[in-house]
Amino acid sequence: MNRAADVIVVGAGVIGLAVAYELSRRGARVRVLDARGEGQGASQASAGMLAPHTENLDQPPLWRLGVRSLDLYDGFVDGVCHASHLDIEYRRCGSLHVGTSEAQMEDLRGTADRLKAAGVSCELLTAALVRELEPRIAGDVAGGVLVPDHGYVAVSDLMRAMSAAGSAGGMRVDVERVLRVGASASGVRVETQTEVLHAPAVVVAAGSWTSRVAVEGDAALPVRPVRGQLVQLDWPVSPLARIVWGSDCYLVPWTTGALLVGATVEDAGFDERATTAGVHDLLASACDLLPSAWQAGFLGVRVGLRPATPDGLPVVGASLGVPGVYYATGHYRNGVLLAPITAVLLADLVLGQGEDSALASFAPGRFTGVRS
């Protein structure tokens, strides 16, 4: 019998690596398997925004989980940097959400009221104050909302550092396609294209490819790929001090002068091509929001497949069909934000250190059922 590790993690995206790193940090022997290698899914088109108060306010369970994860981020990044001896670009620079019409400003006023009622620090700004903070913003901006707690992390830096930190703790990452997962006399059986492995526990974190991993006893999770295209521009000096959101795009400035412009949302199946239409729309939206973008250098376009579920919530928790199997998938546009909290909650569950009550909203059983 080939016992590969204490835990096998299927998937080497930001969620899979975060879970593997956390398990390794706690002393588990971890092996990560992914047919495409590290960071080849949604991570490729992620701007790394850490902004739960913007995207998730209308989904309270997801918003609360995002807030908890954001609270973990300082310590998470410090720990990964220390363990890997690598630097990660990470800034809590705040985000500025701008409107160009009275209708958009009405929405932003409502958002500010809801955030303040929830105890979130934010400020409703006039057009003059917006331009004082960000002088290069377009002249037709009517006002905005500043959320100082938001920030971003450079996903490529984070992935590289998590991999190195996990490896230092004995984690192993292999390019290997997993076909089936099922129960065995000693725990969980994992069938790959080349071998059969056994481990006490398996975490399925395969993102958009989750449905291609057959888990005996569970119905397939309804996780579908949603294509995102992200453009990267370049200035000698960053044109913005913080993340800026408009109605049609967001802009994430790095300290290097790079500016990430994102992102499209396309139901294109497993098509990972960059398209002329996607790049055109992103560039036009960026230039509407930041007119000087027409003079920026063009560094390229990235494409990633985000794993979406029918209810917009991730799937995190134990399989109903196979003891020792757990899911961490379906994070859609929130994988980077939710990586620290997902890793902690999954590690607690896998290692028998308790089940957080928050996981009830994300349980796999809402989709999988149990097959007879």
Image (cartoon, rainbow, N blue to C red):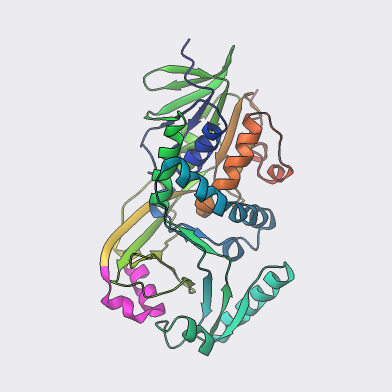
For residue 149, side relative to residue 178 (left or right)? right
Q: Residue at x 38, y 50 (%)?
A: 156
Q: Is residue 358 visible?
A: yes
Q: Is 230 located above or below residue 180 in the figure?
A: below
262 or 29, which lies in front? 29
Residue 231 picture location, percent across and down:
34, 63
Q: Main secondary structure of the magenta part?
A: helix
Magenta highlight on residue 291: yes
Which residue appears farthest toward the top when viewing the image?
A: 1
Work out whether 113 lies above or below 365.
below
Residue at (28, 71) in percent of width and height = 236
Give the residues in magenta.
280-297
Figure disc tally:
0
Q: Residue at the spot x=59%, y=56% of the render?
A: 70
Q: Is residue 218 visible?
A: no
Quadrant, the C terminus: top right
Where residue 28 sits in the image (x, y, percent)? 55, 27
Q: Nearer the viewer, residue 255 or 44?
A: 255
Q: Specify whether 339 is left or right of 67.
A: left
Residue 307: give x, y in percent of width and height. Answer: 49, 47
Up the image or down, 183 lies above or below 154; here it is: above
Decide which of 135, 195 is in the foreground and name it.
135
Q: Give the percent coordinates (x, y) of residue 292.
A: 32, 80
292 drawn magenta: yes
